[in-house]
Image (cartoon, coloured by chain):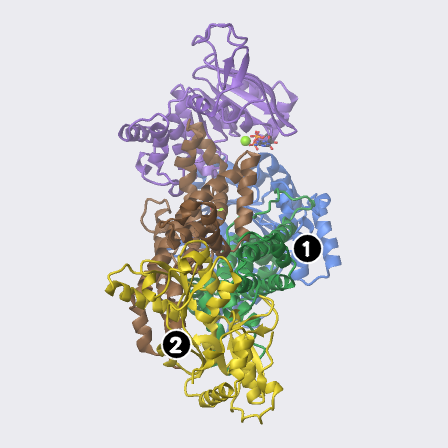
Chain colours: A yellow, B green, C blue, D brown, E purple
């Protein structure tokens, strides 16, 4: 369901000036790891066109500059090296804008996000606030900000005189889902947008515990540090937000349009 | 979640698995060819008189025996293009990077296989060839190599099967071979059992076919005038190998 | 031939001179002095039997004569021509491996363990020297190989691989393989000592046939009866030197040296 | 992004690498022990008279030679606990699942190593032992095994080095060993050059130490009354092995 | 001893009877009938030399007598007692492997290729049967092993491993290893044919010493001189049957059978 963005049906604004020094002339090349529904994934599971919010937003961005979007498929591990080796101009990959990452790359905000808790339907109802996770076993994707959030929660639990949560990290999100469904872990922590998708895919077995965490972090589009593209891209995203394109794409991908209000 | 035969069969006939299996085998074949060529050079270096050649060949085997192939793939795909802009071009695909990376690592193992095969040829063969007036190169090509190949065949076959399974490491440089095909599907659909079962079937078929091929080739090297083999053939050849 | 007078080939070689001459041959391995000044001649058509205890250097001497290893000192002359070296100004330098390979064609060698090429049939074993060294076309090489197998009585086994032949048959193929190159001298290193007693005879018979046909042969062997019947000259080798050298009858029935008598008491 | 020596050194002395390296080696050791035990049984099965034992052992090697270890780990971790509730308990940690999974796969390869080592012992040894009046079990323990161990040592050493690198597969069941430690660091900081370089240093050190150990053990099996070895020792033993 | 009358041990054994009796021994491999009714006796202290062409079944006969393989038919009796089987009612059944192992202790065997245990020193090779079969304490076993090595002239090599010994020394250790078990009969399968000619003597000397000390021995050999000097009886074996059996002088100087004369013309 590659969404038609509003800018394609309404009055087409004159294309903004495209950034210089693109990897492939005439194309905006983006590193992407299409295993993260609903942000980026293959239409047919393991093959087909890449769809999802990020994919559609990337296409809209390219169009904004009068370019064509080209996806350079990479694993999660390969996203940043791909950018550094100029295989792509930017990463559209559901990456949190963390301090450590901003030390090595630039990023422009694209949507707000936050951790969400998934658990079996019965248990999910019991989680109302972060401290409810104390003493529970929680699965997370390794090296994610979500995993880091559980690590900080350990201290909070200790301060509150409760048991620490037990964190188990897996390389892929699918394995965290499996861990909960197999009873290896009681809950899993995942970014809210992906969490909703997982719950929908595993209805009856997994449910989102709403509102446990604040939605206080931001996904960004990453570019090389101090690259001339960085400011241009930030401007373009602002423009796409302003004219409602991003909100429409969110809606088309069954996401709350409010999440793109990050400016 | 129960095992859904429908999804399983659908995956089994899904052309992307077939394509993934093809990629796995193709990467393995090219990597083995590269590894055999480089490994032969390294083996000659290790048995050579020259201290420098010995040292270089020894370093190669030591280094690539120690480094995980995954790291080599990451380096070839991510670091080398920063040093050599030519590698940033379109032709340097994950497929090419994968077979080169796996081939380079595998060469360290093939070098040892080839070296021990060469060493196991009786010195009398070399003497007999030279006594006939053959040049050292002729002795190598006409006398030693045909015999060394026979000895190197079983372990090489095992390495090849290892490489097929091993090519899944190339998913890290976004080559979507057989195992990655299943994993990507799992990440979206969460249908573990069906997707992985389909992959297992493919692996069993591939490895069984390769084992049959290996037995066939080995029979060609029995060197008897009769057509019937001396040893009973089994699905599994003697010797160990890589595994993934 | 060089016009410069050279120390060991001062006079021009004539067929009356020894076809092969060995002068003051020395060879050491690490700290072990294995050959310590071996000297002998052999004339065209002669058969020389070499006896000697294990480790006395017999095999080493044959390997040196076949140019398979360089000597530390001394000379090997074939028809008056020094082998394995070339003159450069006043110094002699060892030949490069390619040139050595050429000179080796003239000297055939038969090994104790046959050393047939296991991946080739009997016929192809015999052909290999012709096709890959003398560059003779396969068809002609095959004809000559078959003729040679016929001579050692094995033409009916031409298509068989070494693993399918008895030890005696393998050694006969090995003789054919050396013979087909038409060497000036044929060296045998204990050609029957890896054979079952009952298979020794067939190989010795072939060798006796060669001797009768006028082949020049040096045979390291423990077969006293063969040495007595076939050899023109019998040599006792010990600790890297030739101890006694005589006609078979003299050697066996009236040995001059104490060492020879002691050796014969063991083997005889 | 330049190579930052500071970060590199900081990673090198980071205790989590040391711990990851320890986990890698520990998983490899336990997996090898398990694989040797199971592999010995499978090897006996394959050389046994019984058709059933032969068939079962043959199936084992065929199956586990074909299946990627990654899939076996996923199955042990995710599928088995559904069948056996006892595995849902706390003690069934990723560490235990990892060494069992790798051990089961490796057993197929160890079985072939052990089988060919047993077959390579001259039949005369068996005859001589029995002629002395030793029972078959005594002959196995006192005569055949000590000699088979010597033959199996070099390939087993290679398998062990392979297992160390291989243990990184266990990241899929949330075991954070050496390579995973580096990868996690990379994903958080994007500093791949420094992190991977640190991991490479660790791998080189581990494998070099293991190779020295291997040479030392092999020298113990030279069976001479003199202490000096017959063969020159090199860093790399003859033979091939797994690699990751 | 069983009180039931049994076909082949009807009378009680006395020392005047043969210590070992072989009756109608048959053995087949696949479609090959290797032993075809072998029969002989040997008395206490006798030495029997067995000659015969390759493949005639000599080694097979020794393996059967050493209970290393079951016969297809026939009987082996040691001091009148049938070996390798036990009576169950009216049928004889083969002994289980554990029982066979016990009976094997009484029959020593020396192999052509020595078959020493390469991972054990000479002394430990000799000790192994004592410690692991007879459960003799290590200290006593070592003393007895050293005494036996002394007897074969090798006590100075006790700490050496087989790879450090010459072929002749290895075979002498193998003899000591068999001897230390104190067997009633010692079987030798071509004990010198894997040795260099110069090393044969030392082994034959040890064997001759044993014969003089009254050991009962069956020796498959090609060493005609040894057979003539040491054996009490010489046997020609061919195609799985005994062709000729006679005293050494009779056998070599006046053979009764055409087959023997033909064989001797090859080997003699
Ligand atoms: N390539 C080599 N390197 C080191 N030492 C060697 C080599 N070849 C032979 N020798 C040594 O040289 C000595 C003579 O060996 P050689 O094989 O010539 O003796 P031989 O008379 O042929 O004995 P045999 O009857 O056992 O064949 C031996 O002590 C042997 O160990
Ligand atoms: N285990 C076996 N399986 C099949 N055939 C065998 C076996 N052992 C011996 N034979 C065959 O039995 C025949 C007799 O062999 P055996 O070794 O007893 O002969 P031999 O008289 O000792 O000969 P040699 O002098 O060569 O040692 C041979 O044809 C041999 O191939
Ligand atoms: Mg020799
Ligand atoms: Mg025999």
Image quarter of the C terminus of chain E: top right
Image quarter of the N terminus of chain E: top left
Using a 10 Å C-alpha cutoff, classify the residue at mark 1 as few (fewer than 14 neighbours), some (14 to 19) or many (20 or more).
Answer: many
Residue B237 in sight? yes
Q: Secondary structure at mark 1?
A: helix
Q: Position of residue B50 (x, y in %)?
A: 44, 67
Quadrant of the rendered structure where residue B135 is? bottom right
Looking at the image, is C36 positioned above or below residue E39? below
In the picture provided, is A131 more to the left or to the right than A9? left
Reading the image, the residue beneath label 1 is C127
Pick the residue in front: D48 or A165.
A165
Which subunit holds the residue at mark 2? A
Residue B129 in sight? no
Quadrant of the rendered structure where residue C103 is? bottom right
Q: CA distance from mark 1 to mark 2?
A: 81 Å
Marker count (numbered): 2
Which subunit holds the residue at mark 1? C
Q: Position of residue C98 (x, y in %)?
A: 57, 66
Q: Position of residue B81 (x, y in %)?
A: 49, 79
Q: Residue at x 44, y 60 (%)?
A: D172
Pick the residue in front: A252 or A239.
A252
Reading the image, the residue beneath label 2 is A217
Q: Residue at x 40, y 28 (%)?
A: E178
Mark 1 touches mark 2? (CB < 8 Å) = no
Quadrant of the rendered structure where residue A113 is? bottom left
| For discs 1 and 2, the disc positioned in front in the rendered view | 2
Pick the residue in front: B187 or D231.
B187
Looking at the image, is D86 positioned above or below residue C4? above
Q: Position of residue B25 (x, y in %)?
A: 60, 61
Query: Disc 2, ligand 1: is the CB inside 8 Å?
Result: no
Looking at the image, is E173 positioned above or below residue D178? above
In the picture provided, is D156 more to the left or to the right than E142? right
């Amino acid at each position: 369901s590659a969404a038609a963005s509003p800018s394609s049906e309404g009055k087409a604004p004159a294309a903004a000036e495209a950034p210089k020094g693109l990897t492939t002339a005439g194309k905006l090349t983006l590193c992407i790891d299409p295993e993260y529904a609903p942000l980026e994934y293959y239409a047919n599971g393991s093959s087909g066109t890449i769809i999802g919010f990020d994919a559609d937003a990337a296409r809209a961005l390219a169009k904004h500059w009068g370019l064509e979007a080209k996806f350079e498929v990479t694993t999660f591990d390969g996203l940043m090296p791909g950018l550094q080796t100029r295989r792509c101009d930017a990463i559209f990959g559901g990456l949190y804008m963390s301090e450590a990452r901003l030390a090595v790359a630039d990023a422009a905000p694209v949507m707000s996000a936050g951790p969400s808790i998934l658990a079996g339907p019965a248990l999910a109802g019991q989680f109302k606030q972060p401290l409810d996770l104390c003493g529970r076993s929680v699965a997370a994707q390794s090296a994610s900000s979500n995993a880091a959030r559980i690590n900080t929660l350990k201290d909070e639990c200790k301060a509150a005189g409760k048991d620490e949560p037990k964190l188990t990290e897996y390389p892929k999100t699918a394995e965290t889902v499996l861990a909960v469904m197999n009873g290896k872990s009681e809950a899993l922590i995942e970014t809210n947008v992906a969490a909703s998708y997982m719950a929908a895919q595993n209805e009856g077995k997994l449910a989102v515990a709403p509102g446990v965490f604040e939605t206080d972090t931001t996904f960004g589009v990453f570019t090389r540090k101090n690259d001339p593209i960085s400011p241009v891209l930030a401007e373009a995203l602002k423009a796409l937000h302003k004219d409602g394109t991003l909100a429409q794409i969110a809606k088309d991908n069954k996401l709350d349009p409010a999440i793109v209000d990050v400016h | 979640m129960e095992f859904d035969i429908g999804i399983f069969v659908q995956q089994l006939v899904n052309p992307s698995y077939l394509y993934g299996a093809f990629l796995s085998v193709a990467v393995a074949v090219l990597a083995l060819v590269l590894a055999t060529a480089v490994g032969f050079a390294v083996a000659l270096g290790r048995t050579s008189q020259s201290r420098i050649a010995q040292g270089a060949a020894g370093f190669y085997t030591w280094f690539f025996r120690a480094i995980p192939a995954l790291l080599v793939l990451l380096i070839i795909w991510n670091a080398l293009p920063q040093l050599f802009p030519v590698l940033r071009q379109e032709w340097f695909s994950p497929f090419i990077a994968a077979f080169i990376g796996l081939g380079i690592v595998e060469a360290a193992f093939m070098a040892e296989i080839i070296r021990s095969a060469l060493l196991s040829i009786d010195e009398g063969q070399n003497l007999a060839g030279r006594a006939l007036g053959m040049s050292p190169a002729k002795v190598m090509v006409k006398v030693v190599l045909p015999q060394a190949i026979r000895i190197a065949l079983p372990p090489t076959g095992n390495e090849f099967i290892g490489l097929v399974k091993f090519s899944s490491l190339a998913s890290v440089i976004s080559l979507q071979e057989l195992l990655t095909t299943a994993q990507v599907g799992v990440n979206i659909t969460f249908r573990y059992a069906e997707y992985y079962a389909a992959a297992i079937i493919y692996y069993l078929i591939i490895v069984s076919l390769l084992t049959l091929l290996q037995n066939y080739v080995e029979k060609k090297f029995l060197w008897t005038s009769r057509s019937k083999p001396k040893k009973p053939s089994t699905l599994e050849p003697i010797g160990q190998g890589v595994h993934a | 031939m060089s016009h410069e007078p050279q120390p060991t080939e001062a006079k021009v070689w004539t067929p009356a001179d020894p076809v092969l001459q060995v002068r003051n041959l020395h060879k050491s391995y690490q700290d072990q002095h294995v050959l310590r000044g071996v000297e002998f001649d052999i004339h065209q058509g002669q058969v020389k039997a070499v006896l000697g205890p294990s480790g006395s250097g017999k095999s080493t001497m044959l390997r040196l004569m076949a140019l398979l290893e360089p000597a530390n000192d001394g000379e090997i002359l074939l028809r008056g021509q020094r082998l394995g070296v070339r003159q450069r100004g006043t110094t002699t330098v060892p030949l490069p491996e390619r040139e050595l390979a050429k000179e080796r064609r003239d000297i055939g060698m038969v090994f104790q363990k046959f050393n047939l090429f296991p991946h080739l049939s009997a016929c192809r074993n015999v052909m290999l020297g012709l096709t890959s060294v003398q560059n003779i076309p396969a068809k002609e090489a095959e004809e000559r190989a078959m003729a040679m197998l016929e001579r050692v009585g094995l033409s009916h086994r031409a298509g068989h691989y070494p693993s399918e032949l008895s030890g005696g048959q393998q050694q006969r193929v090995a003789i054919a393989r050396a013979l087909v190159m038409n060497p000036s001298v044929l060296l045998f290193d204990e050609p029957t000592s890896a054979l079952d007693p009952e298979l020794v005879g067939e190989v010795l018979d072939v060798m006796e046939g060669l001797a009768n046909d006028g082949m020049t042969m040096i045979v390291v062997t423990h077969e006293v009866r063969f040495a007595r019947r076939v050899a023109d000259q019998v040599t006792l080798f010990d600790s890297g030197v030739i101890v006694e050298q005589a006609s078979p009858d003299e050697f066996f029935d009236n040995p001059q040296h104490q060492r020879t008598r002691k050796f014969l008491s063991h083997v005889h």
